[in-house]
């Protein structure tokens, strides 16, 4: 049975493990250079930079969503940015990903957010289709830029 809950400090090692599984799935293991202590500090320290929702299936960590708040100057409202959503392969097809997205949408609405955003790798067709079924659409007019600082 599925249970969604806010992550607790004791979940950090399993969240870090899930992030590793996500990095492997996305073929980005070489980009995973963070450590569990930094993750703990940023999820539960002051200031708190991110939040996570755990998806437990029969008391086993089946997946998670990690998010943070940003701000839209045009809307003059906060936004919620989904950094990572991952469901372990053995638990896919059970509605866990959709439940996590719905929980984040609810959290965003409760916080008065004007939008819920995330990025997806262009080759990840199954994720793209999943997000389309959720009602999301790609932004055609914007290009993501990044400057690596680490």
Image (spheres, helix red, strand yellow):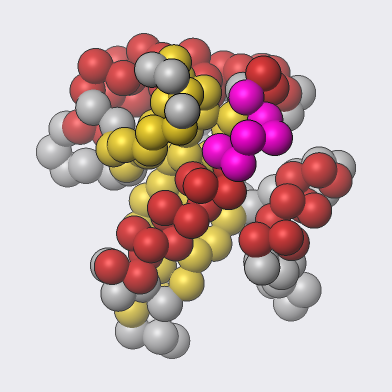
Q: Please indicate whether residue 48 sits to the left or right of residue 101 in the image.
A: left
State the residue at coordinates (28%, 38%).
Answer: 6
From the viewer's perspective, is residue 46 above or below residue 130? above
Q: Which one is nearer the viewer's eye here, 104 or 68? A: 104
Q: Please indicate whether residue 136 sits to the left or right of residue 2 in the image.
A: right
Residue 51 x/y as whole percent = 32, 42
Give the residue at the far left of this rendering.
Answer: 46
Q: Is residue 94 magenta?
A: yes
Q: Which one is nearer the viewer's eye here, 90 or 77? A: 90
Q: Magenta segment range?
A: 91-96
Q: Please indicate whether residue 87 sits to the left or right of residue 1 in the image.
A: right
From the viewer's perspective, is residue 93 above or below residue 111? above
Q: Please indicate whether residue 27 sits to the left or right of residue 23 in the image.
A: right
Res 101 visible: yes
State the residue at coordinates (60%, 41%).
Answer: 95
Residue 93 x/y as whole percent = 70, 35
State the residue at coordinates (38%, 62%).
Answer: 106
């Amino acid at each position: 049975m599925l249970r969604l809950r806010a992550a607790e400090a004791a979940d950090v090692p399993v969240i870090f493990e899930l992030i590793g599984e996500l990095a492997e799935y996305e073929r980005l293991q070489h980009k995973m250079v963070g450590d569990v202590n930094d993750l703990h500090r940023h999820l539960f320290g002051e200031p708190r930079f991110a939040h996570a929702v755990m998806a437990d299936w029969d008391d086993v960590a089946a997946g998670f969503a990690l998010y943070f708040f940003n701000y839209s100057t045009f809307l003059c409202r906060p936004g919620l940015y989904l950094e990572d959503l991952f469901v372990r392969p053995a638990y896919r097809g059970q509605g866990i990903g959709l439940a996590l997205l719905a929980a984040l949408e609810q959290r965003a609405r409760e916080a008065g957010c004007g939008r819920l955003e995330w990025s997806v790798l262009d080759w990840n067709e199954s994720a793209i289709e999943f997000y389309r079924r959720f009602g999301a659409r790609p932004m055609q007019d914007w290009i993501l830029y990044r400057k690596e600082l680490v």
